Image (cartoon, rainbow, N blue to C red):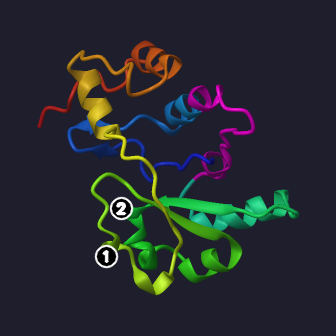
């Protein structure tokens, strides 16, 4: 997996919470993947800096690993807006895009024009928003994320206080 960077980290927030920095998200991803052989967290988009597009990352991966086939896994919630992505046709030419169902997925919302294969995954009722909310209220999240990720969130004091506006 590669880690997306925020467009404007200084002011980025989701609902009522400041979103963690790219550095923090990368560290959490590294910790989450540590238990899974063959998976690494790559910071290429963070290192590239500025605005970054999926197609740029696809080209960079293809250059680095020319004999590899790549799959871009996207949630059904973003698949419906795929046509608004930067150069979506080129993405489809370079990688196999696969849509993963999310809780409450309406297959009719997935853009039929793209004819993406859809992979049904078990509905797991966990969202980043819910994790941030629970952490801010001091509620447990150990059944939602790995222990090492939870330890990082708490030690870095992420999501501790909602924004007062």
Q: Where 43 falls versus 157 (above or below)?
A: below
Q: Where 73 falls versus 106 (above or below)?
A: above
Task: Identify which residue is drawn at 75% across, 61% down.
Answer: 60
According to the picture, the residue beneath numbered tag 1 turns out to be 108
Residue 159 position by quadrant: top left
Near-viewer residue (45 or 105): 105
Q: Which residue is situated farthest in the bottom direction here?
A: 113
Question: What element does badge 1 sit on?
Answer: helix
Instruction: Locate residue 84, reporting x and y percent.
Output: 42, 77
Task: Categorize mark 2 by other alpha carbons within 10 Å: few (<14), some (14-19), many (20+).
Answer: some
Give the Cα separation between the discs numbered 1 and 2: 11 Å
Q: Quadrant of the C terminus?
A: top left
Q: Where 88 falls versus 71 (above or below)?
A: below
**The residue stretch that appears in magenta:** 30-49
Q: Which mark is residue 77?
A: 2
Task: Identify which residue is drawn at 64% across, 26% down.
Answer: 35
Question: What element does badge 2 sit on?
Answer: helix
Q: Earlier in the sequence, mark 1 or mark 2?
A: 2
Residue 124 position by quadrant: top left
From the viewer's perspective, tell me whether residue 29 is left or right of residue 18: right
Is 42 covered by the magenta stretch?
yes
Q: Which residue is situated farthest in the left direction here?
A: 165
From the viewer's perspective, tell me whether residue 117 is left or right of residue 150: right
Instruction: Locate residue 81, reporting x and y percent.
Output: 38, 72
Residue 36 position by quadrant: top right
């Amino acid at each position: 997996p590669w880690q997306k960077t925020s467009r404007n980290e200084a002011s980025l927030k989701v609902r009522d919470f400041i979103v963690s920095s790219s550095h923090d998200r990368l560290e959490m991803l590294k910790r989450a993947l540590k238990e899974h052989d063959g998976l690494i967290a790559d910071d290429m988009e963070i290192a590239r800096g500025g605005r970054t597009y999926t197609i740029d990352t696809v080209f960079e991966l293809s250059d680095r690993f020319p004999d590899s086939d790549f799959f871009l896994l996207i949630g059904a919630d973003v698949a419906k807006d795929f046509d608004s992505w930067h150069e979506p046709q080129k993405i489809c030419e370079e990688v196999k895009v696969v849509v993963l169902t999310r809780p409450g997925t309406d297959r009719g919302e997935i853009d039929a024009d793209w004819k993406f294969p859809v992979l049904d995954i078990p509905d797991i009722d966990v969202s980043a928003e819910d994790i941030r909310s629970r952490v801010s209220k001091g509620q447990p999240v150990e059944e939602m994320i790995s222990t090492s990720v939870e330890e990082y969130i708490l030690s870095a004091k992420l999501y501790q206080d909602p924004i007062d506006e």
